[in-house]
């Protein structure tokens, strides 16, 4: 009998050109995380070219949240 997974996934939205930057942050290659949003309705209209939904395990999400809150002012995009 298989046991259900207890892994909680959090969905965030990231500019499509910053997916590699997010991956590098999660793997400790860089220190700054890209801007992210919890809902596609919160993504600003200034995001051109689109954004991607990224599903993270809770531990990865906690790492991102410690570096930047979703509503911190944008310094780059």
Image (cartoon, rainbow, N blue to C red):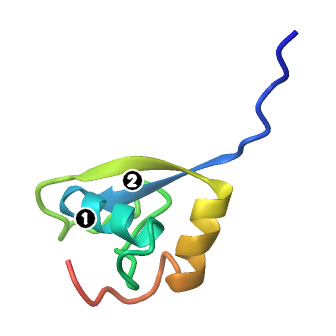
Above/below status of 58 relative to 4: below
Q: What residue sits 43% from the left and 49% below the top?
A: 54
Image-based side of 77 in relation to 66, left or right: left
Q: Nearer the viewer, residue 59 or 35?
A: 59
Whichever of callouts 2 and 1 sits on the residue coming sooner in the sequence is: 1
- 66 up-or-down from 23: above or below: below
Position of 3 compared to 15: left or right?
Answer: right
On the rendered structure, is 55 left or right of 3?
left
Read off the residue under disc 1: 18
Q: Is residue 46 above or below residue 4?
A: below
Residue 11: x and y, percent? 52, 50
Tell me the element at label 2. loop
Circle 2 crowding by C-alpha within 10 Å: few under 14, some 14–19, many from 20: some
Quadrant of the image containing the C terminus: bottom left
Residue 48, x across and y down, in percent: 12, 62
65 displayed left or right of 28: right
Q: Quadrant of residue 24?
A: bottom left
Disc ID at residue 40: 2
SS class, disc 1: helix
Which residue is pictured at 29% across the width and 58% down the height? 19
Q: Do the residues under discs 2 and 1 have CB atoms within 8 angstroms?
A: no
Residue visible at 82% across and 15% down? 2
Q: Position of residue 25 (x, y in %)?
A: 40, 72
Label 1 Cα neighbours within 10 Å, binned few <14 / some 14-19 / many ≥20: some
Q: Quadrant of residue 30?
A: bottom left
Image spot of residue 38 (x, y percent): 50, 60
Depth check: give the residue in front, 30 or 35: 30
């Amino acid at each position: 009998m298989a046991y259900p997974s207890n892994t909680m996934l959090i969905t965030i939205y990231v500019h499509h050109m910053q997916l590699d930057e997010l991956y590098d942050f999660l793997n400790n290659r860089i220190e700054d995380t890209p801007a992210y949003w919890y809902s596609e309705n919160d993504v600003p209209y200034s995001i051109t070219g689109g954004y991607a939904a990224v599903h993270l395990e809770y531990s990865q999400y906690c790492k991102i949240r410690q570096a930047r809150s979703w509503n911190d002012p944008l310094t780059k995009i």
